Image: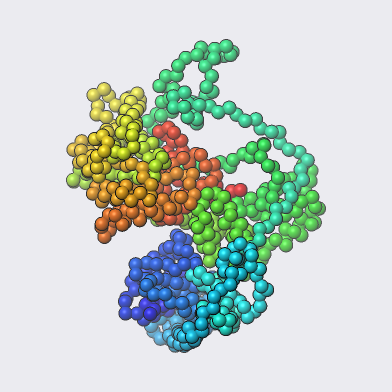
């Protein structure tokens, strides 16, 4: 039934374990749980974690930083695991809590059995017998049908009114429990299994996570603070447009699109030449590593609603005492009083502070509900927002808040840590280093990158940007036109190839007789994309090209024939890097796209070790302002880093992800 039961600290010290199943559980199974749930924070708290053929459920005691894990075959549905974890946690903390605290202080643990760090075998046997006995008794009780008021749908819609809590109706769950169960469920005719009330009360004191708190009501916004003087309204600046590409000009040489000669100090009207367009594209502009994206807080429009809420920054009037404030979601100050004297503001401020308070799920419910709405407004996928909030709840329940801090600031700090760990890649994708290493390959095979994605996300455009960056670093390129479906795809790459080579020659980097830095390999339309890519790689090896960039056709994630074609291309050519190109504009769709592409590459490759997506190219990042949620959704879903960020329409508008800037934009109001 159970393959492994273990107890360890968050620091990685195994305190007790028992291998009871016939199938040996590899340490990599537990390591995968630790990596996903506690390091990357990608595991879902209300679902079991699955690795290989095993399912893992766990409970956490944040007070002592203890983790209790049960491993069983994923094909089995064991309803008593949650109660077993709760009973284990209660018994272990009661008997060995002082030893664990001493161990945390630096003292060694006593090993009476010589087998484990602590002796828990006898107590576990007793707990196991009691759990199985109560579980078998619960199976004899007929299952009663739930009424509509008791269903989740009624609770979410607000139809069912919650009854007052009593000590005997305490809800106890582990971080993996998807449905709270009350201790009186068995006696009321429900076959769901739950611990007794004494166990529930002790778990609540120990700080084991409880999901009894439902959706808390939203806090009402307070009226705006009074102000006597306002800054003069700012005038909107005219947009400058590029005379060549028609796009917005963001370079230093940008100027107003005005060629009239009747204004003083202006020259006669003249057609713009190529030197104006290429003035900002000097060779060293993208030499070496790419620049980071930077987040600049946006300025509010004068016509927008200026009414402030309780989470916005306070406004102070000249000559008056400032209004005391508490941190909001982005760490900025939020007013706690308005038009009131200094004394009342001070009283409200100290009432909002919580010193040395042990956090419970009820304390965090309202703030986490508001945090979830904030994340969704920032374009984070709804299910990803819920998982992030569950991760924050799991990390905070049972912990003691520092003095002079608020629940909001504590939640914000934990959320910032979670998002930072998600966006920080487990491995660094250094293309320049990998290309230089590939040059030493005796076979002469070039470094191959495949670009894939849905229709219209900008695969060809961003391929050209990456090509320009590589050319700036003295790397020769071959572009393989494997989009044999879309009309004009080959011609688009042909134009990019010509422009990139012309830029090199106009800057004096290529002579009249020098070979082109960028070459195009194409065979027209209607051909097999996998065969074209295969021939292109061989041609690139013959021409001593350093890198082959493979452009593929855009395809929707539910188009099975095209997804089979992509999987065939990847399997046949074995590229060094597969990059998924996605828009920063999408929210929930980003999760579905990445899941489907990864699943298709795994299902249709007919390989035991399929090549999945290695990184993400996030396009149109300059159009989203501070709604950076797609970056979190994509990275959370795939576990792969964002390698490039597209920020415009010119070749130099390519940057790398700055984790701090994205987190700052995500937490901003």
Q: Quadrant of the N terminus?
A: bottom left
Q: How is the image coloured?
A: rainbow
Q: Position of residue 613 (x, y in %)?
A: 35, 51
User: Is 239 located above or below residue 582 in the figure?
Assistant: above
Q: Position of residue 280 (x, y in %)?
A: 43, 28
Q: Is residue 111 visible?
A: yes
Q: Residue at x 65, y 70 (%)?
A: 162
Q: Is residue 133 left or right of residue 298?
A: left
> Which of 54/408 is in front?
54
The quarter holding residue 608 reads bottom left
Q: Residue at x 68, y 57 (%)?
A: 219
Q: Residue at x 46, y 77 (%)?
A: 79
Q: Is residue 192 left or right of residue 548?
A: right
> Which of 10/615 is in front?
615
Q: Is residue 28 visible?
A: no
The quarter holding residue 474 reads top left
Q: Position of residue 320 (x, y in %)?
A: 79, 46
User: Is 338 located above or below residue 159 in the figure?
Assistant: above
Q: Residue at x 32, y 79 (%)?
A: 22
How many callouts does the rendering have?
0
Q: Position of residue 304 (x, y in %)?
A: 66, 40
């Amino acid at each position: 039934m159970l393959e492994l039961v273990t107890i360890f600290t968050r620091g990685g010290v195994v305190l007790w374990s028992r291998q009871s199943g016939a199938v040996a559980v590899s340490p990599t199974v537990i390591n995968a749980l630790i990596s996903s749930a506690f390091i990357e924070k990608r595991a879902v708290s209300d679902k079991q974690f699955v690795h290989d053929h095993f399912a893992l459920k766990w409970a956490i005691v944040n007070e002592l930083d203890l983790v209790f894990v049960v491993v069983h075959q994923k094909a089995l549905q064991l309803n008593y695991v949650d109660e077993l974890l709760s009973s284990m946690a209660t018994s272990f903390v009661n008997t060995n809590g002082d030893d664990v605290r001493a161990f945390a202080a630096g003292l060694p643990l006593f090993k009476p059995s010589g087998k484990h760090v602590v002796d828990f075998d006898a107590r576990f046997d007793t707990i196991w017998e009691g759990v199985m006995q109560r579980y078998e008794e619960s199976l004899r009780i007929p299952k009663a049908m739930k009424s509509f008021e008791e269903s989740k749908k009624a609770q979410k819609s607000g139809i069912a009114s919650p009854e007052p809590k009593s000590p005997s109706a305490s809800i106890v769950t582990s971080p993996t429990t998807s449905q709270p169960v009350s201790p009186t469920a068995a006696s009321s005719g429900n076959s769901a299994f739950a611990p007794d009330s004494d166990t529930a009360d002790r778990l609540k004191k120990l700080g084991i996570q409880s999901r009894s708190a439902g959706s808390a009501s939203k806090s009402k916004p307070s009226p705006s603070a009074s102000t006597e003087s306002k800054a003069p309204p700012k005038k909107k600046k005219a947009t400058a447009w590029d005379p060549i590409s028609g796009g917005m000009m963001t370079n230093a040489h940008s100027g107003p699109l005005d060629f009239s000669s009747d204004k003083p100090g202006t020259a006669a009207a003249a057609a713009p030449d190529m030197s104006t367009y290429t003035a900002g594209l000097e060779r060293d502009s993208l030499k070496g590593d790419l620049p980071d994206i930077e987040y600049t807080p946006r300025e509010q429009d004068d016509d927008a609603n200026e009414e402030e809420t309780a989470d916005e920054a306070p406004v102070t009037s000249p000559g008056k005492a400032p209004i005391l404030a508490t941190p909001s979601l982005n760490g900025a100050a939020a007013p706690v009083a308005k038009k009131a004297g200094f004394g009342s503001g001070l009283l409200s401020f100290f009432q909002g502070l919580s010193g040395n308070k042990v956090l419970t799920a009820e304390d965090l419910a309202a703030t986490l509900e508001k945090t979830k709405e904030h994340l969704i407004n920032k374009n984070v996928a709804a299910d990803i927002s819920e998982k992030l909030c569950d991760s924050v709840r799991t990390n905070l329940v049972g912990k003691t808040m520092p003095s002079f801090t608020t629940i909001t600031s504590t939640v914000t700090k934990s959320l910032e840590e979670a998002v930072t760990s998600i966006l920080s890649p487990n491995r660094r994708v250094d293309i320049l280093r990998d290309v230089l290493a590939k040059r030493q390959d005796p076979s002469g095979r070039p470094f191959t990158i495949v670009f894939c994605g849905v229709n219209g996300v900008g695969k060809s455009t961003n391929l050209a940007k990456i090509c320009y960056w590589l050319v700036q670093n003295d790397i020769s390129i071959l572009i393989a036109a494997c989009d044999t479906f879309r009309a004009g795809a080959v011609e688009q790459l042909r134009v990019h190839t010509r422009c990139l080579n012309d830029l090199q020659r106009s800057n004096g980097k290529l002579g009249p007789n020098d070979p082109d830095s960028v070459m195009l390999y194409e065979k027209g339309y209607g051909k097999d994309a996998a065969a074209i890519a295969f021939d292109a790689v061989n041609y690139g090896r013959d021409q001593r090209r350093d890198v082959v960039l493979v452009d593929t056709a855009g395809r929707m994630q539910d188009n099975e024939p095209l997804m089979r074609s992509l999987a065939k291309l990847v399997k046949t050519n074995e590229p060094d890097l597969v990059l998924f190109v996605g828009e920063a504009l999408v929210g929930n769709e980003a999760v579905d796209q990445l899941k489907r592409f990864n699943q298709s590459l795994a299902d249709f490759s007919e390989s035991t070790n399929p090549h999945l997506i290695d990184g993400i190219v996030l396009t149109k990042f300059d159009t989203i302002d501070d709604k950076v949620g797609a970056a979190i959704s994509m990275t959370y879903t795939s576990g792969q880093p964002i390698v490039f960020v597209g920020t415009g329409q010119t070749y130099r508008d390519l940057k790398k992800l700055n984790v701090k800037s994205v987190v700052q934009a995500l937490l901003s109001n």
